[in-house]
Each structure stands twice: as C-alpha cells, then as structure tokens.
Amino acid sequence: MKEIVIISGKGGTGKTSVAAALACIAEKTVLADCDVDAADLHLILKPEILAREDFYSGCKAEIDPGKCTSCGQCEQVCRFSAIAHEGGFYHVKALACEGCGYCYHACPAGAISLPEQKVGECYVSKTRLGSKLVHAKLGIGADNSGKLVAKVKKEAKQYAEKEKQDFILVDGSPGIGCPVISSLSGADFVLLVTEPTLTGLSDLKRVWELAKKFRIPGGCIINKADLNPQLVNVIKEFLRDENLLHLTELPYDEDFHHAITLGQSLVEHAAAKWRAQFQNIWHNIKEVTL
Amino acid sequence: MRIAIASGKGGTGKTTLAVNLALRASETDHVVLADLDVEEPNSGIFIQGKLLSEEQKFRPVPVWQKEACTLCGKCKEVCHYNAILILGNEILVLPELCHSCHACSELCPAGALPMRNTPLGWLRSYKSGHLDFVESRLDIGVEMASPLIRQTLEYLDRNFSEADYQFLDCPPGTSCSVITATKEADFIILVTEPTPFGLYDLSLAVETMQHLAKPMAVVVNRYGIGNDEVFRYCEKQQIPVWAKLPNRRQIAELYSNGEILYTRIPDFRAGINDILKQLKTQSAQP
C-alpha cells in the first residue's frame, strides 16, 4: 500500500481541487484530509460519517480557588504568561497554557490540576463516491495539529489494510511546520501543487527542502500555468535540478471556482475538459510508486 | 494600533492585502508591517526594502550533563511532551518535542539539565520608503512556529510601540500559531473569497476570533467568483464587510511577478482606501 501526500507550501495553489479530482479517478484508495485546522475536502466529497472519535491530547492547568493561597509561585514559573492575577485571584488563561505542568509541580498548596484536553474530533466517513475518507476537526487554537495528523493517517492506514486498498491519498496543509512534517512521515510519494508566482515558487522551494529530508520521491503539478510562462520555466528548471517529476500543467481557469461552488470536483464539473488530464496524472503516480 | 490580517484558508490574499495596506498607509502615517507567516514568509517579495539589521532567534532546550546526572528520573516524570527518554543510564532529549517550559531543568535536583539555545530562524528588519518592514523566517525542519512569532511581537513592542499602525501578516489556519499571532492585536481583518471553501474556513476563523473576543471585519477578495453566501453569513454574524476586492486575470498576473496593486488598479486602490478609512475611525474610538 502506498501513501501519497499532497502539499504546496503556499496556501490556495489548488491542493484540495487536485485531491478531489484524483479522488474521482483513483481506485482502491482511502482518502485522508490532513489539513486538520481548515479541512475542505468534505465540502466536495460530502461524506456520511460512519464513526466519530474524540481526540484527546495534552492537558491544561486549572487552579482550584478554594485551595489557592495566592502565593504566586505558578505565575513565576510559567514561561507562557498563562497565569493571570485578577481581583486577588490567580487563574489560568486557557489559550496561552501549553500544558507543561510546571505550575502543578511548583504549587505548594496542591491547588492546580491538569485535566486532559479534548483537542479535536476524528471521523471515518463514506464519501458520495463510495470511497472512505478519514478527516478531523481541530479545536480552536489547539497546539496538537501534528498529533491529530498522525492520528488521521493511522486510521486511514488501518482502513486501507483492512479493506485491502492500494493507496492512501493525503490532502496536506500549507506551511512547513508540525502538521506538514507529520503528514510527510511514512509517505511514499510527495505530490507538490504549485503556481507560477514568485510567492508560490519561494514556498515550493522551502517545502521541498523540508520534504527532501524524508528521502521521498516527488512530482509536481504546475497550476495556473498560463499566468506567467517565464516563471513556469524557472519552476521546470527547479524540478529538473531536484529530480522531481513534472506531472502536468493546469491552466488558470474559472472552472476551479465554479466546481467548488457547485460542490463538484473538476472531473465531474467538466469531464471532457479535465478527466483525461487527471487520469494521466494518476497513471504516472501509480507508475512511479508501484 | 495593531491590526492582524488573518484567514482560515490559505491563498485568499492575506499578504496582498497586508502589503498594499501597509504601503498605502505609510504614505501619510508611521507604519510597520510584520510578516508573521514565519513558515512561508512572502511579504518581502513585494517590498523591495533596504536591510537594516538581522538577528538570529533561538529558544532554550535542556541539554543533558552526564557527569552531574544521578538518573533519578525526575525530568522524565515532569515532562508532559515525552521529550525526555531514559535509555539505560543515558538521558536523551528530543528538542523537536520540547516546549521550552524549563520544568525539567529547574526541577532537576542535580542541575544536570541546563537550558541552551537552539536556533529557530532569523528576524530581519528593512526600510522601504517610509515603511518599516520586519520579517521572521523559520529555519526549515523546525516544527514550532509560535516561539518565533512570539519573539517577533516582542521585537515590535520594543522598537515600534510609537507606530500609528502595526500590520501583521498572519499564518493561515486556526491553530496555535494563529492564536499567538493574533492574540495581542487590537483589531482583526479576515480575508476570504466568496466560495464554499472560503466561507467554511472563514467561519472557523470567525469562531476563533470570537473566542479571543477580538473586534473584526471581513474583506472579500476575488469578488465576483462563487456566490453571495459569504455576505449573508457576515450579515448574520453582524461582522462588517469593509471591502470587496476585484477578481481579474490582470491582478493575478501582476501578483505573480510580485507587483504592488494599489498603484496600478484603480478599483483595488479604492478598496484599500475604504479599509484605511474604516481603520482610522476604529482607532479613534476609545
């Protein structure tokens, strides 16, 4: 079983549009939406949730005002400015607390507890295409996105094994931080979606420098290619230098917005125009990974 | 006044808005723009500034001192991030899991885990015309963006507390780095596009900002694509829409080459002016 991860560095280059289009073509594939703090794939695939699980990770400090002697030790040791002193009382600012527990150890009155936090939900669903989708919703401001990504990938893998599927197609998040690092771990192929803009190119280079550390082969789709042919050439040169597969070029086309607005993938929205191209992309990815 | 420019969804136009607002405002006011999207900082592509200073940024992580350690296991017991492993009679610190809370270091009875700095990235300060520009860039492979964002905001506090406007170009999403970037802001501008993706991610961002109890307004970029549900949503949530910025191929082409838009596109300029007028009213309020 092979795991293909779609990332881009920059947001808005078309990761989810590509994922949704490939979802319509790929057979024996489990889908995983690992953009856990802004997951959008479900808006196209309209999944019916089969199983839902609360995701607990980390904890946050709580001060029992009945036991607190207002000594201020907790405030002194906290490196996250998460302890506030208002109206003679100490309390924890939940969004600032990173759950390190130092205050719990420092409190001489035993007034601090560290309840575990529900930081999100993880779902296994059946898409309207019949395939399985594993997705999640991260709670507000949670700092466990990497762990939730790992959870989504683990669930997807279990389903893929149980149901003898050949591929896991992962829609990743923008950036190069913890959720992206987590989505790359254990992947077999990196599908980069970029655009010929100076920002897109800069972000592509940074995310590939990260992905390279994992020694995973990669390929690239240049979206909105006709916007800037000169930059397309620069990107192609970069792909050659980095030994990345140049999978295809997609045009700057209002179909992307139309399809999203209608809740469709590109290959459903205008099959004659898009289907062959995405079939070709999927075929090439299969060739390299199998 | 500190204004954070954020959005749930990536690629909606945060950087475009931040750069154009900051440059336009700097024609008449004292303005600093800070790029807090430290994973993928892009404002600098549009701002051809003169580099004034650069400094490397670090965060502290514990380093094990074998000679001092008594292998009592207190460090592992207090660490909530599984960043400390005991392997036989060796202690292994995993810096990528460490949150720099200092608990293991300061609670170690033998003083065997002093904190040492590990690199996070670079902060650079530029000047472009009248505009001050600060960019922080995370080193590739560093997992946590929040510590670098926090230090950049401290830098703004130290150096630009007198500025009329501090514009913050924030990372996408709703996770911890977004909270860190927005939590000390006086006002939030959320940039979206009028599609179901834009709307759904906007609703997550609105929920996050409501949680932080921040005043906010929405700017709809690429107006004309999609549908008008985003406007109905804003009306229902009683969030003002300050501007509708046009969708045109010409704009995408200029953007692709790192061009400034407000000097070339009249209706884009009008939108920027509207937003600045609203901000002026906002900053005049107590």
Image (cartoon, coloured by chain):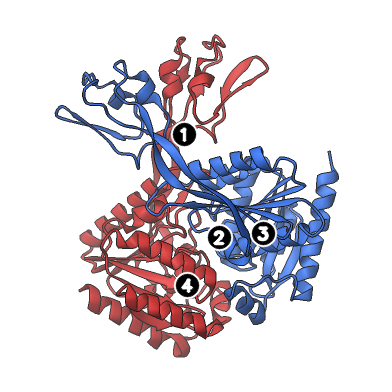
Chain colours: A red, B blue
Residue type, label 4: Ser
Measured in 3D between alpha carbons, the distance from the residue under mark 3 to the one under mark 2, in whole angstroms, is 16 Å
Residue B9's disc is 2
Measured in 3D between alpha carbons, the distance from the residue under mark 4 to the one under mark 3, in whole angstroms, is 26 Å
First in sequence: mark 1 vs mark 4: 4
Kindly report which numbered mark, 1 or 4, lies closer to the viewer in this rendering.
Answer: 1
**Subunit of mark 3?**
B
Disc 4: which residue:
A17
Disc 1: which residue:
A98
Q: Is residue A67 left or right of residue B285?
A: left
**Subunit of mark 2?**
B
Same chain check for tags 1 and 2: no
Location of the N terminus of chain B (image quadrant): top right
Do the numbered discs 3 and 1 sit on residues whose CB atoms are within 8 Å? no
Q: Say which element carries label 2.
A: loop
Q: Is residue A83 visible?
A: yes
Most foreground residue, A144 or A211:
A211
